[in-house]
Image (cartoon, coloured by chain):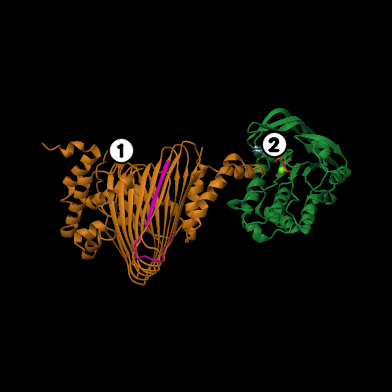
Chain colours: A orange, B green
Amino acid sequence: MNADVRTMKTPAEQALSAAFAATRDTLPGKGAVAALRADAFATFETRGLPHRRVEEWKYTDLRALMRDLYPLAAPPDAAAKARAKDAGKLLAGIDCRRLVFADGAFVPEQSDLTPEQGLSIASLAEALAKGDAATAAQLGKTFPTDDVAVALNAALMGDGAVIRIAAGAEIKRPIHLVFAAGADKPSSSFIRSLIVVEKGAKATIIEDHESGAAQVNAALELVVGDEAQVDYFKLTQARALHVASLLATIGAKAQFRSFAFTRDSSVVRNQNFIRFTGEHAHGGIRGVSLLRGKEHVDTTLLIEHAAVHCESREQFRAVLDDESHSVFQGKIVVAPHAQKTDAKMMTRALLLSDEAEADNKPELEIFADDVVCGHGATAGALDPGLKFYLMSRGITDKEAEALLIQAFIGETVEEIAHEGIRAALMDAAVAWLGARK
Amino acid sequence: MLLEVKNLHVEVEGKKILDGLTLSVEKGQVAAIMGPNGSGKSTLAYVLAGKPGYEVTEGEVLLDGENILEMGADERAAKGVFLAFQYPVEVPGVATMTFLRTALNAQRKTRGQGELSTPEFMKLVRETSAKLGISQEMLRRAVNVGFSGGEKKRNEILQMAVLQPRLAVLDETDSGLDIDALQIVAEGVNRLRSPERSMIVITHYQRLLNFIVPDVVHVLAKGKVVKSGGKELALELEAKGYAQFTGEAA
Ligand SMILES: Nc1ncnc2c1ncn2[C@@H]1O[C@H](COP(=O)(O)OP(=O)(O)OP(=O)(O)O)[C@@H](O)[C@H]1O
Ligand SMILES: [Mg+2]
């Protein structure tokens, strides 16, 4: 007799299967989309939640970390929408186009839908319900992967943003996607967004999650067209399991700059799958994580250079206090034909406590011979010599540390081109430092 | 007496470095300390400033009659202790102006004084830096980052001038300075001489003492003061070396 595979399942895995069985007929999208969901679910069924023996998930054992699946979020009621209203305040001082999602569902009445030349905005649920052909055709195609978190997202995706920026359009105001927790009891949401920036277009996109106690599995498919210029921010504040996947392609001569900022979050996994598909593109992929308590933040990158003459810079920093744990896994893959690739990856962790732990694993897989690639990783405490120098001038212990930590973060934050966002993130970092015990 | 160091014994990583050092500096006095390499001059400077890692096994250090050995470096600074480092460190990412301002305001706060207004502060720094030949461009850079050796030393004197300490310890501020810079720095130091401020000038060279004329010269050897005298003692050392104190042939 064959062993019953189902008895091996964890409660969370069982709940995920049950959730899919219960909702597959009501989730938006028919035909190709329904097939995509079924395929993705099959991937999950055979593989289960990733655990520590799965290389890419070695330090973030989802099977152990995800004890349970919270019930799928119900459509937000008036109270939930009201709660969502206050989210995303970090960027309050910046003139953005705010698009609000409560418990993963689009809230049009709180969103700025003023028409703008070259910009089209829809909700994923709506686009799929309508059977929008362009959306169905792109979904799941941007960066195909068998990653289980992405598969679960595809199987259970409910809503998200579908944004198209027409060729040559310059969207002046940053597009601020606010993903807020609305429900007052634990829930889970599977958010899928699709953003296509066509040839030569310019935009700033902010994916801002304040998910409170809600479990979130978010995925963003981002197509950066040839000669397009995209600044992308991922801001995260989450008190329950938060897994986010960026699936992106970058076209020829495009400029892509991303920045991930994570603080006050319990368990976060930010995974980026980014492929350079056209020559002479530039990518700056950066981020800062601030951790305390028993927080866990994992940044995992797969950067594929699949075209000649592209340049990428990956730069991540983590500040760790108490017993927190940060993970950085960055893999740069240079395809055999991707000659003249110039890729440099650097990750640094600043340990403010002896109990904090940083796992840094930068990796290069180079199959081309004419490339310039490098990586580095450091983890260490504040330099006591520097601290003494500051203190010898009268600066207090805490203030000296704060100055040095700010300087550490600042070197990466400084790379943000948008002055207002740069200042807002630095202020948030300073506020985080101010709350240090 | 502003500073009294009594029978000070100090160890670093289990190694005895100061061995019963006794030294007094009067209010308003400029005391030069000379002595062979490794005799403990910088160690004394660090112990006065409160650098962690130095274990005082015996003795005391009184500033205006108050024991400062239990105080942190920041507290001592607020009490008026200043150390111009032999090797000033680079602090990437911390702008010189921010640094100066944070330091001054922190000291003022500890002393129960209000913060200096921005215009007052800017004026103070601009005037002081101009006299020391420190450009506005340098002030915009991170502390000491990309500064030449001589520029770092000048920056130390700028900090001293802004912070107005009661006791300034200058550890080989003359080393690495060209002749013109030496004069600029010495003038900067001399401007700060006052009956209310004492200075300890650590140096290997008589030349500096032509510019900053000391009231007293102490010779430090093997972790203690072995001879004290007037400014002519520096000339004598220049001529004879330290062999008479170290027991080694010159
Ligand atoms: N952290 C340390 N660990 C071990 N030994 C140390 C340490 N700091 C200083 N020492 C030793 O203590 C002695 C005195 O050093 P110190 O720097 O005070 O000398 P100095 O008089 O300033 O010399 P110089 O004229 O070369 O600047 C030296 O032998 C030095 O090697
Ligand atoms: Mg020395």
Where residue B101 appears, as percent x and y from the top left, is: 64, 50
The residue sitting at 23% across, 60% down in the picture is: A127
Q: Farthest top residue?
A: B58
Q: Position of residue A184 (x, y in %)?
A: 31, 41
Residue A275 image point, x, y percent: 34, 61
Q: CA distance from mark 2 to mark 1?
A: 51 Å
Q: Circle 2 sits on which residue?
A: B47
The residue beneath circle 1 is A64
In the image, the segment drawn in magenta is: A325-344
Q: Residue at x 20, y 37 (%)?
A: A8
B177 to the left or right of A80: right
Chain bearing tag 1 is: A
- A330 in the magenta segment: yes
Residues at marks 2 and 1, common chain?
no
Where on the picture, by quarter, is residue A390?
A: top right
> Looking at this view, is A313 or A20 the one in front?
A313
Q: Residue at x 32, y 39 (%)?
A: A65
Q: Quadrant of the C terminus of chain B?
A: top right
Q: Secondary structure at mark 1?
A: helix
Residue extending farthest to the bottom is A168
Q: Nearer the viewer, residue A228 or B213?
A: B213
Q: Chain of mark 2?
A: B
Q: Is residue A382 left or right of residue A154?
A: right
Q: Is residue B206 magenta?
A: no
**Quarter assignment of residue B243:** top right
On-image quarter of the N terminus of chain B: top right
